[in-house]
Image (cartoon, rainbow, N blue to C red):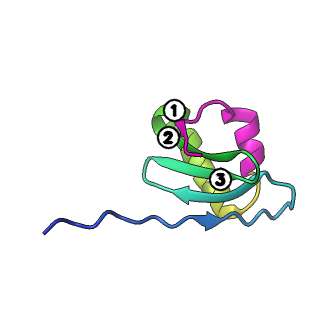
């Protein structure tokens, strides 16, 4: 019997500053998917953005503050692919 694929929930970004462009996030082992309020959904991976940046993104996503600014300043074009 085949194993079911692991479902990773998409979480709503807390947006504690009230100014973030980030709406949702999805944490994976080696990547983070970010849903922007008006820019679509992007996957950032260890390969595209670097493992240190992915780790920082995970911390900021869980904290609910600073993720949009971090992406804008450091990773704007370092996504692996655009989902939609």
Residue 8: percent from left, percent from top: 46, 64
Most extreme residue toward the left is 1
Residue 35, disc = 3
SS label for mark 1: helix
Residue 70: percent from left, percent from top: 73, 43
Q: Is residue 62 left or right of residue 21?
A: left
Question: Compared to 55, does 75 lie above or below?
Answer: above
Q: Which residue is found at the position 72% from the left and 45% from the top?
A: 39
Q: Which residue is found at the position 55% from the left and 34% from the top?
A: 49
Q: Dividing the picture into quarters, in which one does residue 75 lie? A: top right
Q: Which residue is found at the position 76% from the left and 49% from the top?
A: 38
Residue 44: percent from left, percent from top: 55, 41
Quick one: 20 or 42, which is closer to the camera?
Answer: 42
Q: Classify mark 2: residues with Cα within 10 Å, few (<14), some (14-19) or many (20+).
A: many
Q: Nearer the viewer, mark 3 or mark 2?
A: 3
SS label for mark 3: strand
Q: Classify mark 3: residues with Cα within 10 Å, few (<14), some (14-19) or many (20+).
A: many
Label 1 and label 2: CA atoms lie apart by 5 Å
Q: Is residue 22 left or right of residue 6?
A: right
Residue placed under numbered mark 1 in the picture: 48
Question: Compared to 2, does 55 lie above or below?
Answer: above
Q: What range is drawn magenta here?
A: 67-84
Residue placed under numbered mark 2 in the picture: 45
Quick one: 31 or 55, which is closer to the camera?
Answer: 31
Q: Is residue 72 left or right of residue 45?
A: right
Tell which circle, 3 or 1, labels the residue nearer the N-terminal end. Answer: 3
Q: Is residue 82 left or right of residue 12?
A: left
Q: Are marks 1 and 2 in contact (CB under 8 Å)?
A: yes
């Amino acid at each position: 019997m085949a194993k079911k694929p692991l479902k990773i929930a998409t979480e709503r970004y807390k947006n504690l500053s009230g100014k973030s462009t980030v709406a949702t996030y999805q944490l994976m082992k080696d990547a983070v998917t970010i849903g922007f309020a008006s820019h679509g959904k992007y996957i950032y991976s260890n390969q595209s953005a670097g493992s240190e940046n992915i780790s920082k993104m995970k911390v900021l996503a869980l904290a609910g503050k600073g993720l949009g600014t971090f992406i804008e300043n450091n990773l704007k074009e370092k996504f692996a692919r655009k989902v939609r």
